[in-house]
Image: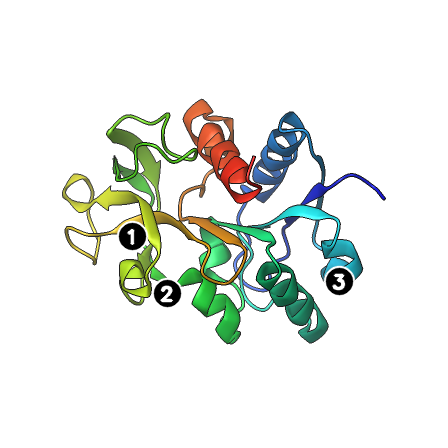
Amino acid sequence: MPPADVLVYTRTAGYRHDSIPAGAHALVELARESGFEAEATDDPEVFTDERLGRCAAVVLLSTTGTVLTAPGRTALEAYVRRGGALLAVHAAANAEPDWPFYGELLGTRFAGHPPLQPGRVQVEDTTHPATAHLPAQWPWADEWYDFTSPPRDAGVHVLLRADESTYTGGTHGADHPLSWCHDKAGGRFFFTALGHTSESYASPAFRAHLAGALRWATRG
């Protein structure tokens, strides 16, 4: 049997981020550095039980709109429920808008964002592999996603929050989660709202954020 690998999925049916090529390249590199084979694809036909059965993790990279077929949804849900790892990055918060299972994984939905601008990230979990390397207050520039409901209300484990006092246009107030994780559906799910720009994926701090997420999700 081929070694376990990481599948980075980049299909979009809505807005397509210019940063997807840089993000896919970085995630493939990070997966290989962690000892996995890796590939990036936008082909929905890869979502089969056989293909996902070889995956150590699946990454949805800024996927927008309906990007899976009905059989693909069935295969991905089965993969997660039997213990698979799913990571969702940035605009993946706006993927599969009419699929209830994916909404349950996210715990909320994308609502919008203010213009790209600098601000500050607050680290809530200082020991998680995705955040342990970060300073308590992390200067960063991004789109500072807002959500349709408070993610924490869905019972997720919050890792990072936005400090809305450091930028304009936030809608959540003092508790504005940006990254979270959980294992409520049988497998491990991780989300980060960060990663809008191509430059993000060259940032050592952000790359370590993604690499730590991958380690956590694959129980590495």
Q: Is residue 122 left or right of residue 81?
A: left
**Label 3, on which residue?**
49
Q: Which is nearer the N-term, disc 1 or disc 3?
A: 3
Looking at the picture, how far across and down is residue 104, in whole percent? Answer: 44, 68
Residues at discs 2 and 3 in contact (Cβ within 8 Å): no
Looking at the picture, how far across and down is residue 145, in whole percent? Answer: 34, 53
Q: Amino acid under label 2?
A: Thr
Q: Is residue 102 left or right of residue 119?
A: right
Mark 2 neighbour class, 10 Å CA radius: few under 14, some 14 to 19, many 20 or more? many
Q: Amino acid under label 1?
A: Pro
Camera-nearest residue between 193 and 52: 52
Q: Which is nearer the N-term, disc 2 or disc 3?
A: 3
**Label 1, on which residue?**
114
Secondary structure of the residue carrying tag 1 is loop
Residue at screen point 69% across, 66% down: 75
Secondary structure of the residue carrying tag 3 is helix
Camera-nearest residue between 14 and 44: 44
Quadrant for residue 187, please give it: bottom right
Q: Is residue 139 left or right of residue 166?
A: right
Q: Which is nearer the N-term, disc 2 or disc 1?
A: 2
Q: Is residue 116 left or right of residue 39?
A: left
Residues at discs 1 and 3 in contact (Cβ within 8 Å): no
**Label 2, on which residue?**
108
Q: Is residue 51 above or below residue 192?
A: below
Q: Amino acid under label 3?
A: Asp
Residue at screen point 46% across, 38% down: 197
